[in-house]
Image (tube, rainbow, N blue to C red):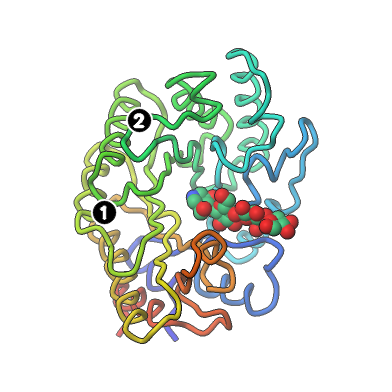
Amino acid sequence: EPVLRDLAAAHGIYYGTAVTASKLNGTYATVAAQQFDSLTPGNEMKWGSVEPVRGDFRWSGADAVVDFAEAHGQKVRGHTLVWHSQLPSWVENGSWTADGLRAVVADHIATEAGRYKGRIDHWDVVNEPFNEDGTRRQSVFQRVLGDGYVAEAFRAARAADPAAKLYLNDYNVEGINAKSDAMYNLVRSLKAQGVPIDGVGLQAHLIVGQVPSTLRANIQRFADLGVDVAVTELDIRMTLPATDAKLAQQKADYKAVTQACLAVARCAGVTVWGFTDSDSWIPDFFEGQGAATPYDENYRPKPAYYGIAEALGWT
Ligand code: G3I
């Protein structure tokens, strides 16, 4: 069997996976450790997970992922500091003044990024700030703090963990479109203002047969702005049941995404959003769809897994 982390390392990129802390034992843990050299906690570092009640911190899930990664020579992508979703209700529904929310966000970033200082390779500092048309999503942060909350978050993250690479992350920005244009313009403007942004994350929650034809060119244009790029949440869903034809197309799609990253020197690596169909958000969120990851529900490698390996030079 090919080992994705070794194949990726030979090309100077990482191959990562999102994991669920409570599942890190048995075969799940074995595959995660053997095949991947970067882990992202799927939910455990989100604000609602770490501080569900103001001042009441729950670090056990996040700690478990970071400890597991260190024990297995893996990097960690911290996910995520400022996001409109999975917020505790005390943040989402608080009646904030700008100064009040600004202080709470700064404290959250200092506390969480500070706790893991020196142990996180990448932080998704701001997640999903855009609407599909490229305007700003009207999150509590946008409504109360205005456009500047993004720059403030990056500055706070840099102060809390100077060694971590700081990323702006979003979905439906894999190809060149209105949303990725907005992301491009924001990154350019942040760089021009001296805001400490190091990278752009393309989530890549894709559909079988629909890898954007402009993926490589889009990665390249961000690289040309002077930031790294990572594919941060790759999965490629299909309408169930999975057939041989759909699985073959999915193999080609995983291969194409991996090749697009390899083609651009500043593409740092790829993370799959769950490595097994038994640990994927897709069936819960898209009725009748699934089979989106490289391993089946019994941890058997699917054609998609071999597509990744082939892109990484395995024959
Ligand atoms: O923990 C509770 C459990 O106690 C309860 O019994 C169960 C019943 O529904 O829910 C569990 O919480 C779920 C949680 O995942 C942990 O499994 C939430 O309902 C569910 O909404 C949550 O979904 C997560 C989703 O983000 C929320 O938006 C997915 O696991 C997670 O994979 C997904 O990840 C996001 C990225 O962070 C950002 N980009 C998009 C991506 C996919 O939505």
Give 23 or 75, whichever is nearer the viewer: 23
Q: Position of residue 57 (x, y in %)?
A: 77, 39
Q: Where is residue 191 in the image (x, y as percent from the top left)?
A: 32, 28
Q: Please, what secondary structure does the residue beneath circle 2 have? A: loop
Nearer to us: label 1 or label 2? 2
Q: In this view, does 303 lie to the left or right of 43?
A: left
Q: Which amino acid does label 1 sit on?
A: Ala
Which quadrant does ligand 1 occupy?
A: bottom right
Q: Please, what secondary structure does the residue beneath circle 1 have? A: loop
Q: Is residue 135 left or right of residue 151?
A: left
Name the disc covering residue 143, or none. Answer: none
Q: Distance between the residues labelled 1 and 2?
A: 30 Å
Give 194 or 99, whichever is nearer the viewer: 99
Residue of label 1: 265
Residue at point 26%, 39% (across, down):
178
User: Which quarter of the rendering shows the N terminus?
Assistant: bottom left
Q: What residue type is labelled 2?
A: Thr
Instruction: Return the disc, 1 or 2, that comes first in the chain's sequence.
Output: 2
Give 113 or 252, whichever is nearer the viewer: 252
Q: In this view, does 44 lie above or below 286?
A: above
Residue of label 2: 135
Q: Position of residue 254 (x, y in %)?
A: 34, 70
